[in-house]
Amino acid sequence: MRIDLSRRYYDSYDPNVWTKAGFDPKTGGYNVYHKDHNFSTIGGGGQAEKEVGAILMKLGKQVEFLSEKGHSTRHSDLYFDGQTWDVKYAENANLENIRKKIYGASKQADNAILFVDTNKMEMLRDAVARSNYHKPIGVYYMQIGVVEIICLK
């Protein structure tokens, strides 16, 4: 998408519904937060979502953090590239925990983003290889400075 067109989309979000959180003039990526999106302060998940949003914005993605109001515990966190995404923070995760996080994401969204602060790529690959998910799902692995896509579809 052309950067000027992306800027127009970003500027068009209704400020009564959305918070404009950032626009990258080099890539055309942006983040908007729905007023009813909850960035949890428990367990680091909310901060992980913001970090993921910043990484995606730098990659040129137009990211919407979705409303969580009126949803049960099952909802998607993000929308971009025409798909829904669920962000899972997995800093202290072991193999079984990672499998459960991806399985949970498969019930909530089209894709999962696993965010960690340290390198758990081998563990993630092993978890993906050993698991059956609710439906086919794409998994993005994100670590500061590292983005890798493991496609399960």
Image (spheres, rainbow, N blue to C red):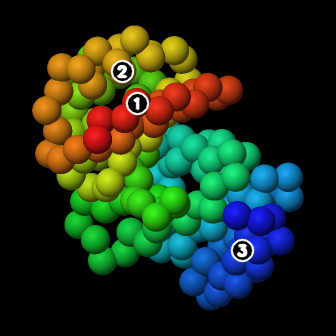
Contact (Cβ within 8 Å) of mark 2 with mark 1: yes
| SS under mark 1 | strand
Instruction: Give how far apart the Cα atoms at labels 3 and 2 are.
Output: 34 Å
Q: Is residue 106 left or right of residue 38?
A: left
Circle 1 packing at 10 Å, graded few (<14), some (14-19), many (20+), is: some
User: Residue at (43%, 45%) from the top-left corner?
Assistant: 87
Res. 19 visible in picture: yes
Instruction: Give how far apart the Cα atoms at labels 1 and 3 are.
Output: 29 Å
Residue 84 lies, in percent from the top left, at: 40, 59
Circle 2 packing at 10 Å, graded few (<14), some (14-19), many (20+), is: many
Circle 3 packing at 10 Å, graded few (<14), some (14-19), many (20+), is: many
Give whichever of discs 2 and 1 has the lower sequence position: 2
Query: In the image shown, does 71 or 107 lie closer to the viewer?
Result: 107
Quadrant of the drawing holding the N terminus: bottom right
Residue 148 lies, in percent from the top left, at: 52, 28
Amino acid under label 3? Tyr
Where is mark 3, residue-wise? 10
User: Residue at (71%, 57%) from the top-left corner?
Assistant: 29
Where is mark 1, residue-wise? 150
Q: Is residue 96 left or right of residue 4?
A: left
User: Residue at (37%, 35%) from the top-left corner?
Assistant: 151
User: Residue at (85%, 52%) from the top-left corner?
Assistant: 26
Quadrant of the drawing holding the C terminus: top left
Amino acid under label 2? Leu
Comparing labels 2 and 1, the label whose residue is closer to the camera: 1
Whether 29 is drawn above or below 112: the answer is: below
Whether 39 is drawn above or below 51: the answer is: below
Q: Which mark is residue 124?
A: 2
Instruction: Give how far apart the Cα atoms at labels 2 and 1 are.
Output: 9 Å
Amino acid under label 1? Ile
Residue 42 lies, in percent from the top left, at: 44, 44
Q: Image quarter for residue 73?
A: bottom left
